Amino acid sequence: MPEGDFCQRGGRFGPHNLHEMRTGTFTSSNIVHVTYFNAGVRVYDVSDPADVREIAFCIPPPVPGAKTIQMNDLMVDASGLVFATDRVAGGLYVLSCDVEQ
């Protein structure tokens, strides 16, 4: 669970989509990319299921007039670029995430 006051920020909060590791995209037995609506994009190391660790995150600021972001879908390409969308009005974000597979 991400640390922070996300339940009080408004909008939706919680895990939504995860990168499905389709052929030709980023694949890993240990790294999971997830959108969390108003908590942004989260990256977890699940190599030890008893000790899942968050290893990266990105919470873009909301666009003018929006109370919060609502990160929705994501896909990670083979080079590690993360493509994520904000379902409200934020558009498409392209993030670089250098993690070991």
Image (cartoon, rainbow, N blue to C red):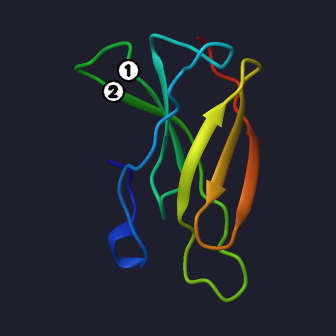
The correct choice, above or below, for 37 with respect to 15 in the image is below
In this picture, residue 31 sits left or right of residue 91 = left
Q: Which of marks 1 and 2 is nearer the N terminus?
A: 1
Q: Mark 1: which secondary structure? A: loop
Q: Where is residue 78 in the image (x, y as percent from the top left)?
A: 72, 18
Residue reaching furthest to the left: 50
Q: Name the residue under label 1.
A: 46
Gap in angstroms between the C-alphas marked 1 and 2:
5 Å
In which quadrant of the rendered image does the C terminus lie? top right
Q: Is residue 68 left or right of residue 52?
A: right
1 and 2 marks in contact (CB < 8 Å):
yes
- Residue at the bottom extreme of this rendering: 65
Q: Quadrant of residue 99?
A: top right
Residue that label 2 marks: 52
Q: Position of residue 18 (x, y in %)?
A: 47, 37
Furthest residue toward front: 23
**Where residue 16 sits: x, y (%)?**
41, 50
Horizontally, is 44 left or right of 50 in the view? right
Q: To which quarter of the image does residue 52 belong?
A: top left
